[in-house]
Amino acid sequence: MRLSRAFMPTLKESPADAQVVSHVYLVRGGFIRRLAAGIYNFLPLGWRVVRKIEDIVRDELDRAGAQEVLMPAAVPAELWQESGRWDKYGPELLRFKDRKGADFCIGPTHEEVIVEMVRRDTSSYRDLPLNLYQIQSKFRDEMRPRAGLMRGREFIMKDAYSFDVSEETATTAYWTMYRAYERIFRRCGLDFRAVEADTGAIGGSRSHEFQVLADSGEDAIVACDHCDYAANVEQAEVAAPTAPGIAPGADGHAAATTRATVATPGQKTIEEVSAFLKVPATQLIKTLIYIADDQPVAALVRGDRGLNEIALKKAIGASALYLARDSEVVAATGVAPGFVGPVGLTIPVYADHELRGATAAVTGAGAADAHHVGVDLARDVTVTAFAPLRLAGPGDRCPRCAEGHFRGFKGIEVGHVFFLGTKYSAPMACTFIDEQGASHPMVMGCYGIGITRVAAAAIEQNHDGNGICWPMSIAPYQVEVIALQAGDAAVVAAATALYEGLTARGVEVLFDDRDERPGGKFKDADLIGVPLRIAVGARSLKDGKLELKWRRDDKPTLIDVDGAVAHVAELVAAEQQRLRALADAPSAAPGGAA
RNA sequence: CGGGGCGUAGCGCAGUCUGGUAGCGCGCUUGGUUCGGGACCAAGAAGUCGGAGGUUCGAAUCCUCUCGCCCCGACCA
């Protein structure tokens, strides 16, 4: 592509609404433009990246035995009513009526549709297993789209669905996809980790997230420094405490052991109370009021801990849970947030395991501007149940091995694999006949990859102060040739020959033939991030040399004009081969290498 | 959905408090000088000041209502 004819509008300044590097560079580099909140146009450069990622995904899924299909974006409500999700999914599901008044939605995921597709034409065990996937735009009406492609409302997703006759073969399908995902993300040049995850609204019993490690990630994950256990903090198991987390003298602090009420005017947060009473946060008990299936409950964790809402949900056995609004807190406890305490509560009280045997604790007094000190949980509080409620965090002992401790990471979730079982196939009567003539629901799995999010995640992980440093496998072009002096006939001739020679060999080349100053061309090249750059300039050309520079390197190297086409083509082939070979590294899945 | 903030030229912003009919930088057009890491000079084009209503002799500026967008917290690829 000649840059002089390309639609690649680059910007010197960052758009005001961009907060994360991937968003800034995608917009500045002319990859995407915003059309509405969380909805983007893909310009030629951005679309090329998307297609590169899609091609890798297709290649690996086909290799793993999956078949590509395409389902409609507009889905009739009846299907969603059949699975029960029409009423459960909430406002994130974009609904609309057609001209006849029939309800539809734009599919945010396609379990219902694929089940309908498969059940209609599959009835025998002989037809299974089956693994079907599509790459398609999805729409989720996020309450807060943000960070450009990282969390859009309309986004491109690959979703795959497996259908099996048994738990055993479905488990095999699950791990086959797990291995395919490892290969896909390795080939994309990403540093990622597969972690155990919550199954969330999609449901099911087993799940792994593929998290690209990046400080800008929205997900917190923990990984053992000794064994291979890694999990989203929402899902991470917490090792059983070996001693009460709160006891007199914890942290070397002498604390009251008899209960008393002290005035704490205006001191609401853990930090404020801790500072005001000169008591470490570990001596405090945090009392949180939740509404679980419309009933208020109290959840207790140590002051310095976070509460794991998923764990609380499991402990209660609730299907819906949210942090109570201020008015609901007052209604349930008689006091506003900040001074709520467990003593004397009449609602169910769930306490974190770590609090078992807690004494000398500080809690809210259940009255405005006051706290209790010297609370003995066993003596003063009616605990409905103890459960592992706190959030796992860095430094925690690993629950799976004796020696390890957790390290914390931030991740961007680019893929998710779920073992669904019969969650959709049973209610939707997606069944098969076995050898004995008996009918059974198919055992399903579903597997997603956020294609457009992969592009953003790749930038988060591969950039510097000047722009993007694409891994070659997903770069919009493999090589950028710059004619530094567009007015110099020799330079233009040499650059054009290189461009045409490489293109003829199948190398994807971006040719900066614009009549711009060299500085501007270098800046744009760094911004766009094509991995290999060849500068053709009068200075080197008079010695028969070209300047070759990898985007990640600081200094260029000189190569001979003679044989440059073959030389560069070989470099590209070698780099592509290197990235492709990464896929063959050992797998973390049971059964080893893919 | 709760809390905070912003809508003025394609982009980034000033002007709003204290009403007087719109300005700066980048980009764009033309001419000239430049030409190896975002040059300089000169001359231009470009804005119903998000929208509607109101107050006023007069509104970007004050009031009301709306729409859009961004950021911080509960959801997910």
Image: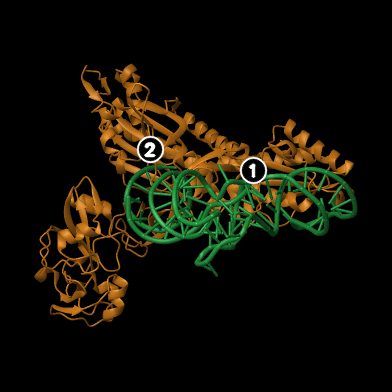
Residue drawn at 32 percent across, 73 percent down: A271
Residue A274, image x and y in percent?
29, 76
Quadrant of the image occupied by residue A426 = top left
- Which residue is under mark 1? A575
Instruction: Depth check: give the residue in front, A221 or A459.
Output: A459
* Chain drawn green in the picture: B
Of A562 and A535, nearer the camera is A535
Q: Quadrant of residue A84?
A: top left
Chain coloured orange here = A
- The relative height of residue A98 versus residue B42 in the rendered view (above or below) is above
Q: Position of residue B70 (x, y in %)?
A: 48, 52
What amino acid is found at the position of numbered circle 2 in the picture? Trp
The residue beneath circle 2 is A175
Labels in figure, total: 2
Give, as a three-letter code, the residue at label 1.
Glu
**The N terminus of chain A: image quadrant:** top right
Disc 2: host chain: A
Q: Mark 1 Cα within 10 Å, few/some/many (few <14, many 20+)?
A: some
Give me the C-alpha separation between circle 2 and circle 1: 29 Å
User: Residue furthest toward the bottom?
Assistant: A254
- Rendered view: B13 above or below A195: below
Residue A512 vs residue A371, the one in the foreground: A371
Left or right: residue A568 compared with residue A152 = right
In this view of the protein, can residue A331 be seen by the observer?
yes
Is residue A584 visible in this depiction of the protein?
no
* Marks 2 and 1 belong to one chain: yes
Image position, residue A300 (x, y; %): 21, 63
- Left or right placement of residue A223 versus residue A586 in this view: left
